[in-house]
Amino acid sequence: MKTKPNRADYMFKNRKGEILIKNPGQINGLDFVVMYCEDCTIYICDITAQVFLDASKNCKVYFGPTTGSLFIRQCEDVEVSCAAGQFRVSNSKNIKCNVYAQSDPALEKSSNIILGPYNFSYPQIQEHFERAQLNLPEDKWSQVFDFTPNFNQRNWSIQLPEDYQLVSKEIDEFGEVQQHPVPIPVAYGGSSTKQVIIGSLDAANQEQGGQGLDFIMGKDRVDKIQAQQFVESEQSDLISQKAVYAQSHSDSVRNFEQFDALDSTSPPQTNNPVYTNTASKTYQDIDSFEQPKLNEQQKVVREKEVQEMKDKQERRLKAQQFLQQFNNELLQRVTLKKQQNRIIQNGQTKQEINKNPWQTILQNIKIKDYQGDKEISSMQRALLARAQQ
């Protein structure tokens, strides 16, 4: 009986200040998730189907080849090396990406994204690239497609050649480090004479993007210094993405935050860049693999906040109604008591009016107990007679 994989083995979650590694064969072409990590250095030295890098900060993350899509979502101050069929960044900022991308890298609601050629190597990486079957000559790492362009200042830029560095991870039990097979442009220290295209080559973007940087050492004698100057000038005045360009792509806009990590369905191919999930292998062995759905979590939080506000307003309304009812009942009781006091007071007054005043006098003096020297018998008889009238 086949052992069911443990989903915890296919993610790094809630880690801080650690060096984390997955060796060759530990993922073996399945999905992988990195989420809620901070101040970590992470090495994924294996082939993956899809990768999600979510809600992480101040991390350096190095990936082997990914046959499908690699998502970066809600990240900040992260360095990433990856090679994927599709590369997507959304709701992130300050991301340095050294990538191989088989299709145009896609950005959405992100800023200060720097892209350069792929730079990660480790033992057995060449075998993993063979299994991934990526079309290495068709590397579109620089042909960026920005769904939400900033017309005042572009959200992305190309890495300066002087900042490009190779990164390798030694793993003793797996042999020597192998150089990754992705062609590196001449200006970045490699041997590839392929023209580097800055911006998407989509037909609707021909005038604003798709401008070439001829890193061709033999033909045009573009050396590293000239390439450096070209990239620096490109930062300020190359690829002016106008509003009409964004409007022409409105039907292609996708919200990358709602992709399911286990969804392997791909829509029909078109001439326009369609950024969809095209993983060739999904995590079929896990029934309910925990994938990050931050948008759903945010929705739940917002719904909870709205419900809490409604509950608070209902409680406040009930309290106001109770207080109003209490005040009304108290006012009624006070009014009734006043009325009763008036009735009692009026009744006592009438009794006093109808009462013989001589009886009151007899109540206030002690005629029978008088022990003085004077003769008061005649007064006693007169008082008693008056009181009896």
Image (cartoon, rainbow, N blue to C red):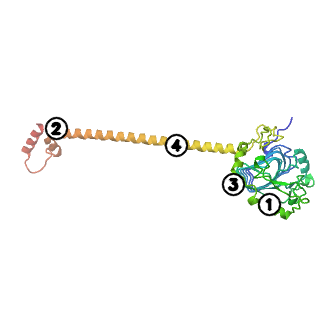
Q: Which residue is mark 1?
A: 231
For marks 4 and 1, the one nearer the N-term is: 1
Residue that protrudes farthest toward the right in the picture: 175
Q: Amino acid at mark 2?
A: Asn
Residue that protrudes farthest toward the front in the picture: 207
4 lies left or right of 387 = right
* Residue 354, numbered circle: 2
Front: mark 4 or 2: 4
Q: Mark 3 and mark 2: span between their CA atoms? A: 101 Å
- Residue 221 visible at all: yes
**x 24%, y 41%: residue:** 345
Q: Nearer the viewer, residue 186 or 115?
A: 186
Q: Amino acid at mark 4?
A: Gln
* Residue 186, numbered circle: none
Q: Which residue is mark 4?
A: 313
Please state the total of marks drawn on the protein image.
4
* Residue 151, numbered circle: 3
Residue density around tag 2, few if under 14, some if 14–19, many if 20 or more, within 10 Å? few
Q: Nearer the viewer, residue 107 or 269?
A: 269
For marks 1 and 3, the one nearer the N-term is: 3
Task: Give the SS element for disc 3.
Answer: loop
Task: Give the SS element for disc 4.
Answer: helix
Front: mark 4 or 1: 1
Residue 90 vertical placement versus 163 (above, below): above
